[in-house]
Every structure is written in structure tokens, then in C-alpha cells.
Image: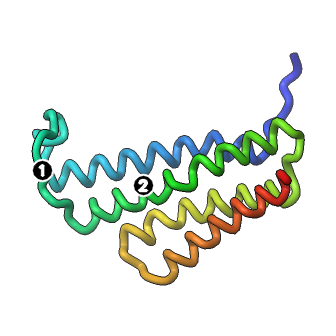
Amino acid sequence: MTDMPLSTELVLLGWSVVLLLVHVALQGQLGTLDRGAGWNAGPRDGAPKPLGPYAGRAERASANFRETYPAFVALALGLAVTGRTGELGEWGALLWFAARIAYIPLYLLGVPVVRSLVWGLSLAGLLMMLLRFL
């Protein structure tokens, strides 16, 4: 078996798992700072203490990421399986990934408007991938 280079879409699929883990770790660490290690390590019964602004934003940013992540995974795999990687799909994957990275600090810092525009760019990246797939 020869080692074939991975397409950009598949490389970004691998790095997207790292990005998912960053979201999970960030959300967990900031939540633990607000609610305490005892709550985090315990059974988490009852109503949790409300999250502060940063932990709440990290939780919402993570949920937002997870809303579009399945579409990215499906499109990246679909492009690879059908041999349609490259061109518009590659640029779409790059756009989605870059926008999702930029989204994290924008959301954590509470930057209005720009954060929404960056989210729109990530959606445009998915649409580019979809157009290449179809």
C-alpha cells in the first residue's frame, strides 16, 4: 500500500477533532472555575450554580460549534469518498475551519456583529463544500 497524501478536507477533518476537544476543554475548565471542582467531580445532582459570563459564552460557543460540526464531517467525508476534494470544497473547508477558530475568542470576548459575520463565513464554507459535493 502506498502512502497517498490526504486531501485538505481530510486533514482539516482531523484538525477539527482537535478543535472539538478545545471547545470541550475550554467549556469544562471555565465551568469548573465558576462551579468548583467538587461540583465538576460530583454527580451534578440538583440545579447547578449559574455560569459566569465567560463560562456561559464558552458553553454557548461549544453548542454552536456542535450544531454545524456534523455537516462539516459529512461533507468532508462525502467529498473524499466521491473523489470530489479540491477546488470549491477545499476552499470551503478552509473557510469553515478558519472561521470556527476565529469564532472562539470573538464569542468569549463578547464581540457583537463581527462574531455573527464570522459565523456566517463558516456557514458559507459549508455551502461551498455542499456545492462541490452536489
**Secondary structure found at label 1:** loop
Q: How many labels does the image show?
A: 2
Foreground: 72 or 10? 72
Residue at the limit of the structure toward the top, as seen here: 1
Relative to 32, 12 lies left or right: right
Whole-percent x, y for residue 51 in the image:
20, 60
Q: In which quarter of the image is residue 120?
A: bottom right
Q: What residue type is labelled 1?
A: Ala
**Classed neighbour count for the residue bearing mark 1: other residues with Cα under 10 Å, few (<14), some (14–19), many (≥20):** few
**Classed neighbour count for the residue bearing mark 2: other residues with Cα under 10 Å, few (<14), some (14–19), many (≥20):** many
Relative to 109, 131 lies left or right: right
Residue positioned 67% across, 47% down in the render: 12
Q: Do the residues labelled 2 and 1 touch (CB within 8 Å)?
A: no
Whole-percent x, y for residue 126 in the image:
69, 59
Residue positioned 51% across, 80% down in the render: 114
Q: Which amino acid does label 2 sit on?
A: Ser
Residue positioned 63% across, 39% down in the render: 14
Q: Quadrant of residue 90?
A: bottom right
Q: Mark 1 points at which residue?
A: 47
Q: In this view, does 65 lie above or below 10?
A: below
Q: Mark 2 points at which residue?
A: 62
Q: Quadrant of residue 40?
A: top left
**Secondary structure found at label 2:** helix
Q: Quadrant of the N terminus?
A: top right
Whole-percent x, y for residue 16 in the image:
58, 46
Q: Give the mark, 2 or 1, whose residue is nearer the N terminus.
A: 1
